Amino acid sequence: MRRLLSDVTITPDPTGLPGFGTFQGLVNAVSSFALLACLAAAIIGGVMWAFGASSSNASAASKGQRTVAGAIVGALIIGAAAILINFFYHAGGALN
């Protein structure tokens, strides 16, 4: 059977479109704000956890623990985002 379509390839090129540097700067700024939000959530969660534990309020302590854990996981994902995206891009490119 004859191929009707030619093979398609993809080669990311940051210089291909104008404004790439601006977009990269925007992504970096958003990640900075997201990390600051994770920091604020960790502090607020820690305060909730401490007040809940000291006042024997298990519900507040539990919410504080979940908030701190969410902040830590969020920071982990933000920090690893570029590595994960690049890993899966290269893993997908290796498929034949």
Image (spheres, rainbow, N blue to C red):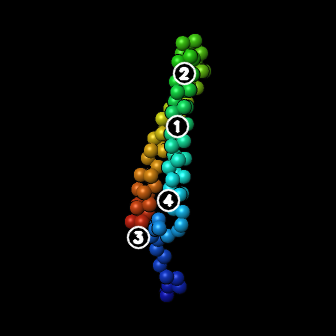
Tag 3: amino acid: Asn
Q: Secondary structure at mark 3?
A: loop
Q: Residue at x 58, y 12 (%)?
A: 55
Whole-number angstrom distance, CA of label 1 to CA of label 3: 41 Å
Tag 2: amino acid: Val
> Which of the image's four quarters has the C terminus?
bottom left
Residue placed under numbered mark 2 in the picture: 47
Whole-number angstrom distance, CA of label 2 to CA of label 1: 17 Å
Asked if marks 1 and 4 touch (Cβ < 8 Å), the reply is no
Q: Is residue 65 visible?
A: no
Residue placed under numbered mark 1 in the picture: 36
Residue placed under numbered mark 3 in the picture: 96
Give the crowd class for mark 3: few <14, some 14-19, many >=20 residues within 10 Å: few
Spot occupied by residue 32 in the image (x, y as percentages of width and height): 51, 43
Q: Is residue 95 above or below residue 44?
A: below
**Mark 1 or mark 3, which has the lower sequence index?**
1
Q: Residue at x 56, y 16 (%)?
A: 51
Q: Which mark is residue 61?
A: none
Whole-number angstrom distance, CA of label 3 to CA of label 4: 32 Å
Give the crowd class for mark 4: few <14, some 14-19, many >=20 residues within 10 Å: few
Disc number lying in front (3 or 4): 4
Q: Residue at x 53, y 68 (%)?
A: 17
Residue placed under numbered mark 4 in the picture: 21
Residue lying furthest top in this view? 55
Spot occupied by residue 45 in the image (x, y as percentages of width and height): 55, 26
Disc number lying in front (1 or 3): 1
